[in-house]
Structures are given as structure tokens and as C-alpha cells.
């Protein structure tokens, strides 16, 4: 069965996978170069990384058909490190990033995606789009008019070419944009920035090498503050992309395996002179929409990318930067969730606050992980507040027996514990109090403490108290941590020792 599954992953869709992988490889070239430039490194660093990460995840990944390579989200986190410490420290950081991701995979942290609310994901995607666009502004500042003209022309080609009959559906419009603008710039000898001005392209296959940094605690202090957010952001984007591809293909994926695969891929990239990367939402969707479903499509994308870069480098170095700027603007426009702006009027205020806070923190700090953390915290707080409103207590008096029965409904936890206590009238003269918990659930120590306070207060007023209807989970936590049925613990509390 396992053998059949692996055969299906690799050979179940050969023709479509090869064609889709070729399209992705062509579209990856400009993005890998552009992301390298964002990070402040030579284009070959992003290109080698994209090749290596795609190939390794093709074999080890938990989501067949997903494309992983050098990405803008990761590149943005590397800028300061590269400026202050250089390429070798970036390679060392890439290795450490991979190690951290493998550890996360073995700790099964892939399940943590279930804690990321939709509003946080939307904010994450929108912030990523804004940062990618902002990264293009230096190329458009104080530039000659030809740069603006070519950027506008590039955007026109990108958005209009798909409407060309037959051929418009066969070739990726970003690639057509780059080829067309490069031909125009070369033919008319337009004097504007080109890829060749940004750094040397590779003319050889990548070679195995260890980062040239001292192996000591000082190096760890430099690279760890970058490796940790890189690992978290890389896994967040990879797991979100895997979820999107799961939905598109109506299949499931192994998120923890994907965590480990991303880690091994980044270790491989670091050892071959590449930067850290992760799954790419845009390229993965392109792959699926082009018919790619299996691991072969990801392998073809990585291998073809390297072949084209190494053997066509003379042409690639003449690509005008304006063409790449157009491609990256297209990526930012396509990444941004425009429906989220329209939905601001329709969605609850809490969802809008979560989304906007994620965007603001990410754009302000340039730290995607910090923004997601803030979004998750807001989501948790709003959820806790909302759930607490559904907790209420009603009561009825059995006058002949001078007994009041309190019926508790909903969830009792840290945010609703004080509210739970306020529902009870401790001054009412009663012989007996029954607390009916058939429709309630006690979640934490705050809830247990609240129940203890209610029971002990009634007993101090002379009433007999009976707690009924506990479900198994609530009974377990109350029996373990509650004191109202433990005379020795009550004695300690009342006696003050």
C-alpha cells in the first residue's frame, strides 16, 4: 500500500507534473532573483536556495505538489543580518533555522496551525503583500523615466497577456513580461539597472561548503535571534500554504512531516550557499492550477530552475530591474486579500481588530512572527471574552424544604469565574443549596477555585451544599484540585496555616 502511494505521488501524473514544474521553474527565476536582492545578497544565493529547497522538499515534504523556495517573507527577515554581518553569517543562520524546524517537526508543532484564526492568516498575508511592495520602492525612487515606463509596461503585460487566445494560457505572464522588457532594453540599449548590476550570477553548479564563521557562543548570539523568527515564519507560511493546497486538491497532508522537510531543505540550502526559504503560496497555486499534483512537479521545478540559470546566465544578467519590480508588484497585489477590506463592514469588530493588529505589527516591526503572535493573542482574548458571555446561572426555590437549586449553564474558566460567583446569593437563609452542573463545564484552576468559594461561603452561612451533575472531565479536575470536599485542606485554609 505504501509503495502504491509513493508510486502515485511520483508517477501518477507524469505529463501534467512535468509541464507544471517547467512553468513554475520559469516563473521562479525572477522571484528568486528579486528575493535575493531584497535580502541584500547576490542573485545566486536565492537561485541556489530555490533549487535546493524545491528538490529536497520534493522527496521529503508532507504535501505533494507544493512549491518551496526562496521567499519574500524570509528575505525580509535577513536584511539587517546581511548588512551587519555578511553572507557567511546568513548561511550559518540558514543551517540553524533548519535545525530548529526539524526540532519543531519532531515536537509535532504542525498541529499549532489549528490555533491560528482565519483573521490572523488574512492579516499575515496582507502584511506580507505590503512589505513586498515597500521593498520595491528603492528601485522606484529618483529613477529615470524609463524605469517608470517599463514598470508600467511590465504590469500591463502581466495582467493583459493571459487574455491572448491560446498562447495566453500556455506561458506564465511574469515570464513574458521579463522576456519582452529585456528584449526592449537590449535592443534600444536603455541605460537602466539590470540584474547584472546587482551581483554575479552563478555559472557553475552549487558546491558543498560550510559557513566560514567561528564556532563559538558569540556566533550563536548573533544568529539565533534571526534563526528563530525565520524558522517560525517559514513554518507558518509553509503550513498555511499546505492547508490552501489541501483545500484546492481535496486531499490531506502531513503537517509535521512538512515541518521536518522544510528543516532538512534549509540545512541543504545553507550547505550549498543558499538562503533560508519556505513554501510559496503563489507558486504552489500556479503549480496546482497548471495541473501539478505530485512530487515530480516540485522536483522538475527545482532541477529546471538550476539548468536554466547556469546555462542561460548571459541572458539573465541583462534582465532590467524594472521587469522584476513589475513582477514583485504583481506578487504583492495578488497576495493581498482585497476582500478583507470589503469585509471590514460585514465582519465582527473583533475579527477586524485581529486582522488589522496583525498587519500593523508586521509592517511596523518587519517581523511576521511577532505580528502573528499578536494576532493569535488577540484572537484568544476575544474568544475567551465571547465564551464567558454564554455562561449563566438560574435558580428555583423549593419552599417546603427551604432549598434553592442553582442550575449552571456554559463554560466556567478564568474569564468567567468571577461572574460565576456573582450569580449566587449568599445572604439568603437556606437549609440546603443544590448546585446543578449538568449543563456546565469546568476548565481550569480558576473555575475550581470559584466553585470552592461558592460552596464554602454557603457553608459558612449555615447551609448544606450538594454539587451534582459533574461531567467526567470537570469531575477529574475538581476532585484533584478542589478543596470543598477535603476537610484537611479546608482546615488549613480556615486556620491560616
Image: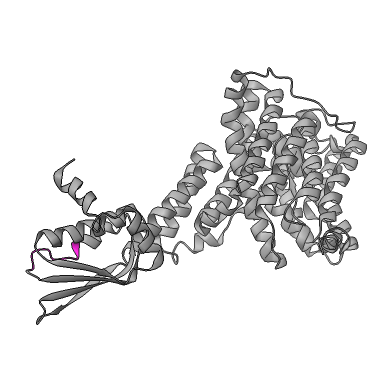
Q: Is residue 51 left or right of residue 114?
A: right
Q: At 63% from the left edge and 49% from the top edge, which residue is drawn? A: 237
Q: Is residue 86 left or right of residue 6?
A: left
Asked if 438 appears above or below 68 in the picture, the reply is below
Of residues 43 and 432, the one nearer the viewer is 432
Residue 469 found in image quarter: bottom left
Query: Which residue range is magenta in the image?
Result: 422-428
Q: Which image quarter holds the C terminus? A: top left
Q: Is residue 482 left or right of residue 253?
A: left
Depth check, front residue: 375 or 442: 442
> Magenta stretch containing residue 103, yes or no?
no
Q: Residue at x 19, y 47 (%)?
A: 493
Q: Residue at x 67, y 47 (%)?
A: 259
Of the pair 310 and 229, the residue shown nearer to us: 229
User: Residue 344's spot in the image, x, y percent?
Assistant: 46, 61
Q: Which quarter of the figure has residue 306?
A: top right
Residue 273 appears in the picture as rendered: no
**At 61% from the left edge and 43% from the top edge, which residue is drawn?**
104
| Colour pattern of the rendering | one colour
Q: Give the left or right position of residue 185, taking residue 474 as reference.
A: right
Farthest residue toward the bottom?
400
Percent coordinates x, y for residue 406 in the rendering = 21, 72
Give the percent coordinates (x, y) of residue 269. 76, 36
- x and y, in percent, of residue 420 in the image: 24, 62
Considering the whole magenta stretch, tell me its main secondary structure: loop
> Quarter of the image containing the N terminus?
bottom right
**Which residue is at the front of the view, 475 or 54?**
475
Amino acid at each position: 500500500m505504501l509503495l502504491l502511494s509513493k508510486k502515485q505521488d511520483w508517477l501518477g501524473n507524469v505529463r501534467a507534473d512535468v509541464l507544471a514544474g517547467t512553468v513554475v521553474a520559469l516563473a521562479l527565476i525572477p522571484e528568486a532573483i528579486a528575493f535575493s536582492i531584497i535580502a541584500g545578497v547576490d542573485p545566486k544565493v536565492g537561485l541556489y536556495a530555490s533549487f535546493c529547497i524545491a528538490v529536497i522538499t520534493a522527496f521529503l515534504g508532507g504535501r505533494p505538489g507544493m512549491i518551496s523556495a526562496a521567499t519574500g517573507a524570509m528575505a525580509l527577515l535577513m536584511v539587517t543580518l546581511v548588512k551587519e554581518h555578511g553572507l557567511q553569517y546568513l548561511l550559518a543562520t540558514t543551517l540553524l533555522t533548519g535545525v530548529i524546524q526539524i526540532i519543531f517537526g519532531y515536537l509535532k508543532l504542525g498541529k499549532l496551525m489549528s490555533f491560528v484564526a482565519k483573521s490572523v492568516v488574512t492579516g499575515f498575508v496582507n502584511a506580507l503583500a505590503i512589505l513586498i511592495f515597500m521593498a520595491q520602492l528603492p528601485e522606484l525612487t529618483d529613477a529615470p523615466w524609463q524605469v517608470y515606463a517599463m514598470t508600467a509596461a511590465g504590469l500591463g503585460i502581466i495582467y493583459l497577456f493571459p487574455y491572448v487566445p491560446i498562447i495566453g494560457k500556455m506561458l506564465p505572464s511574469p515570464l513574458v513580461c521579463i522576456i519582452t522588457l529585456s528584449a526592449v532594453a537590449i535592443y534600444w540599449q536603455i541605460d537602466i539597472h539590470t540584474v547584472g548590476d546587482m551581483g554575479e550570477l552563478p555559472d557553475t553548479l552549487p558546491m558543498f561548503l560550510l559557513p566560514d564563521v567561528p564556532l563559538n557562543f558569540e556566533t550563536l548570539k548573533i544568529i539565533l535571534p534571526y534563526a528563530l523568527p525565520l524558522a517560525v515564519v517559514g513554518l507558518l507560511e509553509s503550513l498555511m500554504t499546505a492547508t490552501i493546497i489541501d483545500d484546492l486538491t481535496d486531499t490531506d497532508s502531513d503537517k509535521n512531516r512538512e515541518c521536518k522537510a522544510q528543516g532538512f531543505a534549509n540545512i541543504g540550502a545553507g550547505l550549498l550557499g543558499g538562503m533560508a526559504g519556505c513554501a510559496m503560496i503563489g507558486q504552489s497555486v500556479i503549480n496546482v492550477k497548471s495541473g501539478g499534483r505530485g512530487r515530480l512537479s516540485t522536483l522538475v521545478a527545482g532541477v529546471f530552475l538550476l539548468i536554466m540559470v547556469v546555462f542561460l546566465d548571459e541572458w539573465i544578467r541583462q534582465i532590467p530591474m524594472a521587469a522584476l519590480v513589475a513582477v514583485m508588484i504583481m506578487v504583492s497585489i495578488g497576495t493581498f486579500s482585497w476582500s478583507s477590506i470589503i469585509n471590514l463592514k460585514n465582519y465582527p469588530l473583533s475579527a477586524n481588530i485581529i486582522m488589522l493588529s496583525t498587519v500593523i505589527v508586521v509592517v511596523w516591526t518587519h517581523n511576521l512572527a511577532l505580528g502573528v503572535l499578536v494576532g493569535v493573542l488577540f484572537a484568544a482574548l476575544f474568544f475567551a471574552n465571547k465564551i464567558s458571555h454564554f455562561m449563566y446561572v438560574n435558580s428555583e426555590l423549593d419552599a417546603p424544604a427551604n432549598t434553592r437549586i442553582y442550575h449552571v449553564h456554559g463554560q466556567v474558566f478564568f474569564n468567567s469565574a468571577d461572574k460565576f460567583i456573582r450569580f449566587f446569593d449568599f445572604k439568603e437563609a437556606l437549609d440546603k443549596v443544590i448546585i446543578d452542573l449538568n449543563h456546565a463545564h469546568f476548565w481550569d484552576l480558576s473555575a475550581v477555585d470559584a466553585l470552592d468559594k461558592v460552596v464554602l461561603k454557603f457553608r459558612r452561612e449555615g447551609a448544606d451544599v450538594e454539587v451534582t451533575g459533574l461531567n467526567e472531565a470537570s469531575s477529574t479536575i475538581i476532585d484533584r484540585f478542589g478543596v470543598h470536599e477535603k476537610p484537611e485542606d479546608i482546615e488549613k485554609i480556615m486556620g491560616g496555616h
